[in-house]
Image (cartoon, helix red, strand yellow):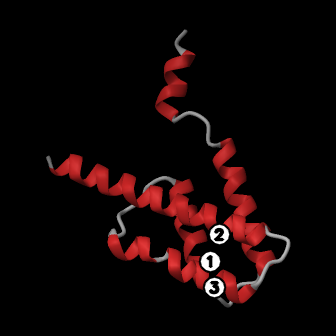
């Protein structure tokens, strides 16, 4: 049972990270970007993390997603810097592919 609870907490945390990141990326890509409105939106969206505790993440994508979220909450970062991080995160997500154990399975055939 402890494993199921831990897994559900991890899934909730990852979903909240994804939701926050998607919101941040859409705000960064708007034509009329306003730093003040962006900060207000990020603070409002950070309430997701007060409701759910942080959990240990072991995939590199999940760790980079978490660091991107933390970078968005660090308001000393520039828009261009955040967009660069978002693009790198998107690139990593797209090239993710199958897990290693699945790749080995497919080699047997």
Q: Nearer the viewer, residue 29 or 75?
A: 29
Q: Look at the picture and state if 35 lies above or below 3.
A: below
SS of the residue under disc 3: helix
Nearest to the eye among marks 2 and 1: give it: 2
**Residue 72: image tag:** 1
Which residue is disc 2 drawn over?
Answer: 24
**Lateral position of residue 64 relative to residue 10, left or right:** right
Real-space Cα separation, disc 3 to disc 1, in angstroms: 8 Å
- Name the spot of residue 2 as percent of width and height, x first: 16, 51
Residue at 51% over, 35% down: 99
The reply to whether discs 2 and 1 touch (Cβ–Cβ < 8 Å) is yes
**Lateral position of residue 66 relative to residue 47, left or right:** right
The reply to whether discs 3 and 1 touch (Cβ–Cβ < 8 Å) is no
SS of the residue under disc 1: helix
Q: Going from the N terminus, do you reach mark 2 or mark 1 first? A: 2
Q: Look at the picture and state if 40 lies above or below 103.
A: below
**Lateral position of residue 63 relative to residue 8, left or right:** right
Total residue callouts = 3
Residue farthest left in this picture? 1
Which residue is disc 3 drawn over?
Answer: 39
- Name the spot of residue 59 as percent of width and height, x first: 49, 52
- Name the spot of residue 51 as percent of width and height, x first: 33, 72
Quadrant of residue 24 within the rendered picture: bottom right
Q: Look at the picture and state if 24 lies above or below 91.
A: below
- Name the spot of residue 79 as percent of width and height, x first: 77, 79
């Amino acid at each position: 049972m402890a494993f199921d609870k831990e897994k559900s907490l991890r899934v909730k945390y990852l979903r909240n990270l994804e939701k926050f990141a998607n919101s941040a990326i859409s705000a960064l890509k708007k034509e009329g970007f306003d730093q003040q409105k962006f900060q207000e939106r990020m603070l409002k969206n950070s309430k997701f993390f007060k409701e759910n505790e942080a959990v240990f993440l072991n995939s590199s994508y999940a760790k980079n997603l978490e660091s991107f979220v933390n970078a968005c909450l660090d308001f000393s970062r520039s828009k261009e810097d955040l967009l660069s991080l978002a693009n790198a995160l998107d690139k990593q997500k797209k090239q993710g592919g199958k897990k290693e154990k699945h790749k080995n399975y497919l080699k047997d055939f």
